[in-house]
Amino acid sequence: MATASILLAAAGEAPPGTGGIMARPSDPEKAVQAEYENLKSKGTREALELFIARHPDHPLAERAREEIKGFGK
């Protein structure tokens, strides 16, 4: 019963409709870097183009553009 009380108290700390305690947002920069690494690991032009489309102004987009040039050689 004590566990239920703790859960109910914790649920009251989160915004309505979220179902309880919300996880802290991750570092946006780390998320973009992880996405880049994930897409780069696919080894395709399409994956790198997807990254560029999602993050056209990010510094890693320039790196992706350079890597795409390597596919043409």
Image: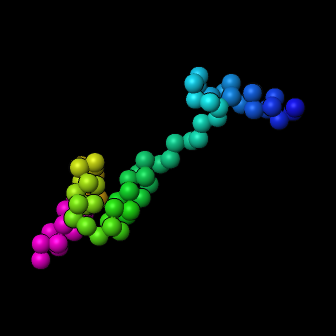
Residue 67 shown in magenta: yes
Question: Which quadrant is the N terminus positioned in?
Answer: top right
Q: Estimate the x, y position of residue 63 in percent, counting from the top left.
A: 25, 64
Q: Looking at the rendering, which quadrant does residue 7 occupy?
A: top right
Residue displayed at 33% across by 67% down: 42
- Residue found at the very far left of the displayed protein: 73
Q: Is residue 3 above or below residue 28?
A: above
What is the magenta range?
62-73
- Residue found at the very far top of the displayed protein: 16
Position of 31 with respect to 58 (left or right) is right
Q: Estimate the x, y position of residue 38 in percent, counting from the top left.
A: 38, 62
Residue 52 shown in magenta: no
Residue displayed at 43% across by 47% down: 28
Residue 16 visible, this angle: yes
Q: Estimate the x, y position of residue 64 in percent, counting from the top left.
A: 24, 62
Residue displayed at 25% across by 67% down: 44
Q: Estimate the x, y position of residue 59 in percent, counting from the top left.
A: 27, 56
Residue displayed at 26% across by 54% down: 50
Residue 33 visible, this angle: no
Q: Looking at the rendering, which quadrant does residue 39 occupy?
A: bottom left
Position of 60 with respect to 8 (left or right) is left
